[in-house]
Amino acid sequence: MKQININNYKFLSSPPFGELEGTKTIDMSTKKVAGSEAVILSLLEEGVDTIFGYPGGAIMPVYDSLYDYGQKVKHVLTRHEQGAVHAAEGYAKVTGRAGVCFATSGPGATNLITGIADAMIDSIPLVCITGQVTSPLLGTDAFQESDVVGISMPVTKWNYQVTTPEEIPEAIAQAFYIAQSGRPGPVLLDITKDAQFGELDFEYKKCNKIRSYVPETPVDPFKVEEAAKLIDKSEKPMVLVGQGVIISNAEEEFKTFVEKAGLPVAWTLLGLSAFPTEHRLNVGMLGMHGNYGPNKLTNEADLIIAVGMRFDDRVTGKVSEYATNAKIIHIEIDPSEINKIVKADVPVLGDAKKVLSMLINNIKENYHESWLEEFRRCDVVEVEKVIEKDIQPTKEGLTMGEVVSMASEKSNHEAILVTDVGQQQMVASRYFKFKHSKSNVTSGGLGTMGYALPASMGAQLGAPDRTVVAVIGDGGFQMTIQELGTIWQNKLPVKIIILNNNFLGMVRQWQQLFFEKRYSFTELQNPDFITIAKGFGIDGHKVEKREGLEEGIQKMFAHEGPYLLEVVVEKEDNVFPMVPAGASVSDVILEP
Amino acid sequence: MKKEFIITIFTENHIGLLNRVTIVFTRRKVNIESLTVSESALPGISKFTIVINANEEQVVKIVGQIEKQIDVLKAFFHTNEEMIYQEIALYKVRTEELYKSDAIEKMARNAGARILEITKEYTVIEKTGHKEETQALFEELNQFKVMQFIRSGRVAITRDPIERLSEFLKERDAILNQVD
């Protein structure tokens, strides 16, 4: 038995952001270690400082080794493996580095799958390590055995089963390289228990090349020139900024690019925060619940410049009636995205940062004031028909828009926004304002309810000095409510806002608009959220009237630790504008 | 318009890769008509030959998704006209029938098939060719009740004078060195 190290023990219940002093020194020269220790050492070599996980039989050797490194790497014990994987996603989103999570075999591993699928579709780098039954038992229906490599294959960028200790360092090195390079994505390593117990000579070499894998293609200067020519002669250009700009840290180049050519910038849900909200060239959000202007004017633009985005169906609406008058420049790192949905006239393959740096030098200085004026005219219409009613309502009930907009203002637009899925996600994305990149954490492609609470924990750990605001609906909150325990145990000062309308609001909105108000199983009988939070040791407050809102939000931000603010909002409010499913973006509607 | 395409994939010889490749088809609900996997001319590199019925747009996207898999080196697609291809079929008939008349022997001779093994009970005939050809022989032989019949997946080779893979690997090395 190893001796219990009091320092390690203390760390687990002390504030998470203390000085981390190592207890076990790592000898970089070759030495014999157990496979389980090689896992930890390899993670340390990759600079991992935080692991989210949940122990169990098949991963116990790794957890035992982790015990010796408690002060070199922080492990966050979540309350469910889904919590661990979403937290790892939140961490990855704000840091740009791979989020790491541990789970045991069988149910532990299968509980990761939703989060892995979420990371796959949203291009989030994750390294998930699962324990597996000992190799002679593989395929025998052993206790807690599941074919996790098979199960996770369609939702991982790469996965691999390790059955011998010697493979561990190389497999982990490849895992990090694959997860973080090119178009990022989740990677899963399944390590059998005998590989964890067996010994190896530990030596670590970072991976920077795999013969069968080209993370990014070198930028073709001719394509850049071609793109520049189109940009120079365009009268009504529109830039669509996606997450690719954030992933490649190209925010500065992007800003220089659009400023030089005076290009209106519209953003996708995942591109949010790549470009400052208050910038004069920002024309708003694209897509189903995006802003009026960028949707309406898509079919008037003569040039679409898509940067690091993938023409999701929520963005394009009916594809055959999308951007009908425009040539398309598609700047993209993943060749399989080119022409996948929308045919590109000029595809420019490569990393956004590199492409934009070249493009800046190729384009002429320009401005498009009268074209921008068209967006502003659309804004006037939207303000009058939607925005004013959303953020300065005169009716009695509180609106989601006014809550989010005030939360943004009271945080001085400096906070990291974490949203769940549904109405609150769309409203928060529309009204929260951003000054800094990597400040928006949401489940875009998969639309995973229950994402926000655990993702906010990862975001807070990844950006300990920043305020993290999680905006969650009453439905989604109850999907991963158990993570309040993790927030409490780790003293994560997350500010949680529940926008409670006692409904699964977005489904209800669709039932109202497209299913004749047949509210089939969308009304919720909710528990007393504040009492629940208090049961977890988290302070909270419920706001039911407009008079209490400002004070409630101020109190939340002034509070030192985690805080839960429940705001009772209008039960049957709808999110507008809206591009009805199957309609063209230019048929965006402002009211029912 | 749907037609037959031959997809050729060069991959690392890794466990589970077949699954990764077939998932791409399954997800798009495209049926695989024929599949052959074996080691290519380069040691350690497997070659897949897959036949599907699809339209060109579908094939382009499928090949793109396959190439995206980490352990896949390169994927190509071709129409039947662009490749030389063969399948092999084995037929088992009763030896008794062979002796009754010279019908079976004639069929085999006309089809360019050959006899692999003759025992007291059965005779095994082998024919290579396109599916229609091996099928036609099956139907002829079946007048005498074929006891067993098996047809392989397709193997195909391009009409190009050189193996594209070695050329491709050189290019790949150049790209990888450039990215560093």
Image (spheres, rainbow, N blue to C red):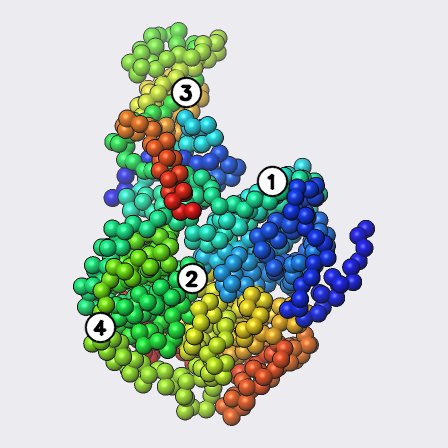
Mark found first going from the N terminus, 1 or 2: 1
Badge 2 is on which residue? A249
Decide: is A104 above or below A139. below
Q: Return the residue at label 4.
A: A368
Whether marks 2 and 3 lie on the same chain:
no
Taking the spot 33% from the left edge, 60% from the top edge, the residue there is: A356
Which label number is shown at residue A145?
none
- Circle 1 residue: A167
> Where is residue B38 shown, x and y percent of the image?
44, 29
For mark 2, name the chain: A
Q: Give the camera-side residue of B6 and A468.
A: A468
Q: Separation of disc 2 and disc 4 at Cα? A: 27 Å
Q: CA distance from mark 1 to mark 2?
A: 33 Å
Question: Residue A557 location in percent, x, y?
Answer: 56, 82
Residue in view at x 56 percent, y 65 percent: A462
Indicate whether A23 appears above or below A524: above
Badge 3 amino acid: Leu
Residue at 72% in and 54% down: A24
- Rounded to the nearest angstrom, the CA distance separating label 2 from label 3 is 59 Å
Asked whether the viewer can see residue A21, the reply is yes
Left or right? Give the position of A558 relative to B56: right
- Where, quadrant-wise, is the C terminus of chain A in this rendering? bottom left
Q: Quadrant of residue A252?
A: bottom left
Q: Are marks 3 and 4 on the same chain?
A: no
Q: Tag 1: residue type? A: Glu
Q: Numbered disc 4: what chain?
A: A
Relative horizontal placement of residue A352, taking residue A192 as reference (left or right):
left
Labels 1 and 4 positioned on one and the same chain:
yes
Q: CA distance from mark 3 to mark 4?
A: 71 Å
Whether residue A194 is visible, yes or no, is: no
